[in-house]
Each structure stands twice: as structure tokens, then as C-alpha cells.
Amino acid sequence: MFRNQYDTDVTTWSPAGRLFQVEYAMEAVKQGAAAVGLRSTSHVVLATVNKAASDLSSHQRKVFKIDDHIGVAIAGLTADGRVLSRYLRNECINHSFVYESPLPVSRLVVRLADKAQVCTQRSWKRPYGVGLLVAGLDETGAHLYYNCPSGNYFEYQAFAIGSRSQAAKTFMERRFEAFNGYSRDELIKDALFAIKETLQGEKLTSSICTVAVVGIGEPFHMLDQKIIQEVIDSIEIKEDDAAAATAAADQAPMQEEDKSSEAAPMDI
């Protein structure tokens, strides 16, 4: 995107009907570390890449617990994500105090979208430069939403945001029809597979990713690194076995061709 005379103010429309400041905020989400979410009928899994900016520093948190039944994963400007997660916590606490029941996920997502939309209509504000994957469980079942800096929100079966997220989307699009019947462990494995797709050849380890789960009888929590590493190791073993089987299948026709070429020609 190039600078032009219509991008100095979030309230200024371009002749093409675009708000460039909002589009720039959405671009900030694409530049952030990848985050993926997958949903079945009973569980929702969030996974993020959380590599440190420097070998001398720790990584920034990308997954936040909002309530026992809701959590978020972010991509984009981490400071904005931290502020919005605090806002979401306050909304859940206020609703629980007044109504003595958990806040429905859809209602919380609408409030977050309304808060983001206000920033697209005020000249003294800027849009939030962060996208949020909201995972939750309520009376209507498991839910996975994506909240965009533009104020839009969408419910998904599976989704990915952040840098190189298209590779993860392609992987999930091939498998999403079976997600409803997935168990908790199967969702975790596919979430790690999707995260691995975004790394483009870089080795996946538990030190550079975070996985969180919420489901029936299981409040929102982040998995221990040892458990994540065990799942990653099992994935790599399966991949090695599949590669060995493919190589053996490829060699079998070649061996048969060699034997046929060694046979004596027929006498005429």
C-alpha cells in the first residue's frame, strides 16, 4: 500500500469508498505472528507462534484467558491485544456479578466488535491494530469467532490469522468437514499441524508455540510445554513413518522394472 491524500484520517473516505487507516490496521494483523483456532462440537483449541524478537528477550504472550469459559488468541499489535483482553475480562466480571451467570460468547463478541467500530468513526482515535480469535463455550455449544479491526466479526469452524496464515488455512480447508466429530486430542494435533505449516520449514518445538483448550467439563487453560512437545514428537514419528512407506512404495515398481530388464529376450 502506498501513501495517498486519503489516508491521513480514519474518517476520510477515498473516492473508491475505502478507509485506508482501517485497511492499514488490518495489514498489521497480517504482519503479526500466526494464530490458529479449531472447533468441534465439544471443544475449541487455540494455538499461536510466540517467537522472541531477540535471543536475549522473552516472547510476548499471544493467548489470554478471559473467563473460565472464554479465551482469546491475538495477532498484530500485542499492546492493543492486551488492552482489549482486559476490556473483555471486565465485561465478563460485570455480567457475572449482575446476572450470576457466565456471559454468552456471542454477546461478548458483539461488544468487542462495537468497541472496535467506534475507532473507525472518530477522528481522534485510531483503529486497533490487532485481530482476535475468540474461543468459548456456552449453553449453545462451542464457538470460535474472529474479530477484525474494522469492527466486523465472523464465526468459523476453523481459522488462521497472522503471518503466513494462508498455508494454515489451506491445510484446515482440506479437513474442516471432519472437525465436528474430532476429539480434544485430535483438535490439538491438527492445530499444531496448522501452526507447522506457517513456519515454512522451520522446526516446530514447544518453546515457540502456545496451545490452549476450552471444552465441556474443561475450563480454558494453556497446555504445559511438556505435553505440547509430546504431541509434536508423535506427529513427527507419524510423518517419518508415512515418508518411509511412500519411499518403499516408490521403490517397488523400480525394482520390478529392473528385474524385467534383466530377463533374457525371447527367441524368435
Image (spheres, helix red, strand yellow):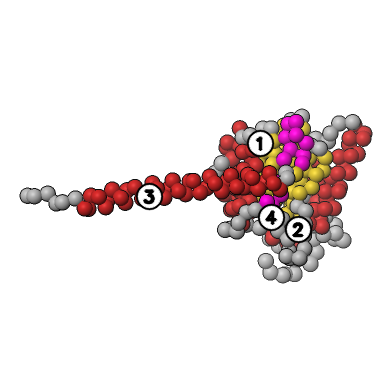
Is residue 234 at all visible to an observer of this figure? yes
Label 2 Cα neighbours within 10 Å, binned few <14 / some 14-19 / many ≥20: some
- On the image, the x and y values in percent for residue 137 come to 75, 35
State which tag comes first along the sequence, 2 or 1.
2
Q: Give the mark nearer the N terminus: 2 vs 3.
A: 2
The answer for how far apart the CA atoms under marks 2 and 3 are is 43 Å
Give the main secondary structure, helix, strand or loop, of the magenta stretch: strand
* Residue under pointer 2: 59
At label 4, which amino acid type do we have?
A: Ile
Q: Residues within 10 Å of mark 1 (few under 14, many from 20)?
A: some
At x 45%, y 48%, the residue is 244
Pointer 4: what residue? 208
Locate residue 246, reporting x and y percent: 43, 48
Residue at numbered disc 1: 184
Query: Farthest residue in the left direction?
Result: 268
Distance (Cα) linking label 2 and label 1: 27 Å
User: Which mark, by number, is residue 248?
Assistant: none
Whether 141 is drawn above or below 163: the answer is above
- Describe residue 248's horizontal placement relative to residue 56 as left or right: left
The disc placed on residue 250 is 3
Is residue 111 on the magenta stretch?
Answer: no
Question: What's the distance in space between the residues labelled 4 and 3, CA to CA?
Answer: 35 Å
